[in-house]
Amino acid sequence: MVWGVLEEMRIRSLGVIDDAVVELSPGFTAVTGETGAGKTMVVTSLGLLLGGRADPALVRIGAASAVVEGRISVPPGAPAAVRAEEAGAELDEGVLLVSRTVSAEGRSRAHLGGRSVPVGLLAELADELVAVHGQTDQQGLLKPARQRGALDRYAGEAVSVPLAAYGEAYRRLRAVTAELDEITTRARERAQEADLLRFGLEEVEAVAPLPGEDAELAAEAERLGHAEALASAAALAHAALAGSPEDPESVDATTLVAGAGRALEAVRSHDPALAALADRMREISILLADVATELAGYADDLDADPLRLAAVEERRAALTQLIRKYGDGEGTAAVLAWAEQSAARLGELDNDDDRIEELTAERDRLRDELSALAQRLTDARTEAADRFAAAVTAELASLAMPHARVSFSLAQTEDPEGVEVGGRRVAYGPSGADEVELLLAPHPGAPPRPIAKGASGGELSRVMLAVEVVFAGVDPVPTYLFDEVDAGVGGKAAVEIGRRLAKLARTAQVVVVTHLPQVAAFADRQLLVEKTNDGSVTRSGVTVLEGEERVRELSRMLAGQEDSETARAHAEELLAAARADG
């Protein structure tokens, strides 16, 4: 089932491309041209639409930004359509509009179905829509980790399910082992830490500070230290307000204010403004009486006991020492917080023996679990490797390598500290215990060798294409983009690659950037990326080739001469053979 087709891309101010529209067919589209820069921009544009890294150096000199827009046909209910709609995107009659803008300053914006979205969402959709393969992917296939990943992808749930459980157990085992090593190797340091915590907690317990006690004692010490001055000031103030019994002739503030109030009360009925002032005078009189009463009580309650002052200062000294050592100078609340945290930490340290026993038991259980899961992974990979190798070998026969044989080597390295697989203790990692390597015997009699050592550039290209064709049968994507997958290939092999890509295009959209006419001839549509130069500015455009124009381009690709009769005849022969094959 085809889940989506890339119908069109528009590229503006990207590299050497000023403004170009790339129309793609549902089947097989070949992109050709004299030089690689323009063709590379087509591949780069698709990479940007798929959430690739935005490089401001891609913006055309003199332009403020580069823009790539794409139209992707996505049927309702397809995984990509569902994910896009979850993000708020809208489909226009089954068409999803995607755009990416890169500014010359390096800022990047993405839009999907009329809605601004994170660039990461485009990359997420790319997994469902397009498989991109180029020279870097061929080099990646040389790495054993990528080869194991390819095998696991082919095996499907037979590997993915136990691999997920294995990964979870592996991460937990690492955490348990790290904690166990930390406890056992740092036993002396942990004992010293426990002694220090215990000493500190005993000091805090001996003093038994209360929250806010330091502030309260500071205020009390201040009051006790100035008791005589406070009492004298309170007595003088009381006499000024209420008068002194020792001086009956003295005039006090309460008497004066009362007299003023009586004077105003006598005439308040004649003027509302004066009545308001009389009310305020009454309030002042009441307030003065209250203050005088409180001053009298303050003087009576004031404690000038020097013994109490000495006790307060002694307590403050004890608290200050605690605060300096355990409260970072922040008060008794900080000391109490330290004590609470330290008690919890001391509990952990005092329970080291119990914790070691628990962790050791969990470690042993996890190692047994990993052994069982690693064995399941090895069995599943071994079974899938035979099927995968047979399928790729069959594909190579269709790519002018009829005698080549592909196989997988699955091995483990013995390690007495490892997990048990097949009755042996072997080393293990985050993906299991298997060391997977793809082997190639290019012709009869040749021993199988790792493809990194035994495959030429052309053979590696065909192996990669064969792997992708096999994947298309078990894990298809709607669109495949191959960037010069035919590098290092020529002659009959190139024809077979073109034929195989055309076959792949029957069930998926295939876009190929190629320099080989044998491959381009099999395409349903051929696009020409051309450069023009007016002496100061270089531009590239994209043209759909049909009829005579396509024959001329194939002639140029064959012989470097568009008007060569021999090259034209060969080009027409290639096109005729491709049509007959289709």
Image: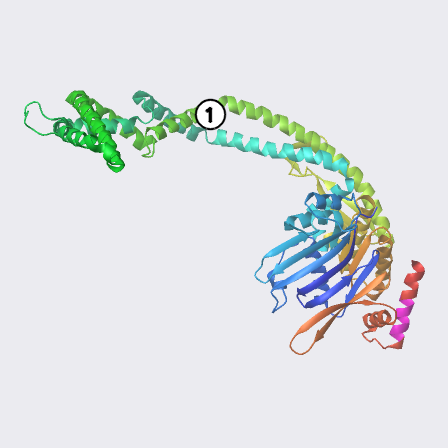
Picture residue at 78% right of the left edge, 40% below the top:
155
**Image quarter of residue 294:** top left
Where in the figure is residue 185, as x and y percent of width and height?
48, 31
Q: Main secondary structure of the magenta part?
A: helix
- Residue nearest the viewer, comparing 464 with 10: 10
**Image quarter of residue 359:** top right
Q: Which residues are magenta?
A: 566-574
Q: Name the amino acid type tagged 1.
A: Glu
Is 557 situated left or right of 202 in this image? right
Picture residue at 21% right of the left edge, 30% below the top:
265
Could one spot residue 24 in this view of the protein? yes
* Snapshot colouring: rainbow
Question: In terms of secondary structure, where does tag 1 sit?
Answer: helix
Where in the figure is residue 230, as x and y percent of width and height?
16, 28
Determine the residue located farthest toward the right in the rendered image. 580
Picture residue at 73% right of the left edge, 34% below the top:
161
Q: Which residue is mark 1?
A: 348
Q: Quadrant of the C terminus?
A: bottom right
Q: Is residue 442 magenta?
A: no
Where in the figure is residue 224, as x and y percent of width and height?
18, 26
Determine the residue located farthest toward the front in the rendered image. 270
Is 451 situated left or right of 52 in this image? right
Q: Is residue 567 magenta?
A: yes
- Residue nearest the viewer, comparing 485 with 55: 55
- Count of labels in the image: 1
- Residue nearest the viewer, comparing 253 with 335: 253
Where in the figure is residue 176, as x and y percent of width and height?
56, 30
Determine the residue located farthest toward the bottom in the rendered image. 535
Could one spot residue 317 in this view of the protein? no
Is 14 situated left or right of 323 in this image? right
Relative to 340, say whether 524 is above or below: below
**Image quarter of residue 456:** bottom right
